[in-house]
Amino acid sequence: MAKAKRPSDTNQRAKQVVDIATGETTDPINENEIKSAAAILGRKGGLKGGKARKEALTPERRKEIAIKAAQKRWGQNKE
């Protein structure tokens, strides 16, 4: 992803600051930082999510979920 840059021209930079301050636009540099931080947090949650769910479910409930998934996958809609 290309890194966002602020304009080097003083007048263009001043206009961008005013636009951001009045809410007409958002700061593209700040948006990239927020997106990358969210991606890192999402990755952390994804790494522990399956294991935490497995530990929280009873073996019977896991079996029900597995049977339902297999039926959906193989086209047997018997519930």
Image (tube, grey):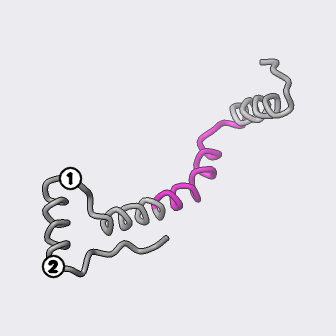
Q: Which residue is mark 2?
A: 10
Answer left or right for 59 relative to 26: right
**Where on the picture, by quarter, is residue 30?**
bottom left
**Is 51 covered by the magenta stretch?**
yes
**What's under tag 1, amino acid-wise?**
Glu
Q: Which residue is mark 1?
A: 24
Foreground of the two, 5 or 74: 5
Relative image position of residue 18 (x, y in whole percent): 13, 62
Relative image position of residue 47 (x, y in whole percent): 58, 59
Residue 9 vertical placement versus 59 (above, below): below
Relative image position of residue 15 (x, y in whole percent): 16, 66
**Where on the picture, by quarter, is residue 65?**
top right
Answer left or right for 62 relative to 32: right
Badge number at residue 57: none
Instruction: Give, as a single range, the part of the protein colored magenta.
Output: 41-59
Residue lying at 36% horizontally and 67% vertically, measured from the top left: 33
Main secondary-structure element of the magenta-colored stretch: helix
Circle 1 — which element? loop
Residue lying at 46% horizontally and 73% vertically, measured from the top left: 2
Does label 1 or label 2 sit earlier along the sequence?
2
Residue contact between numbered discs 1 and 2, judged by CB atoms under 8 Å: no
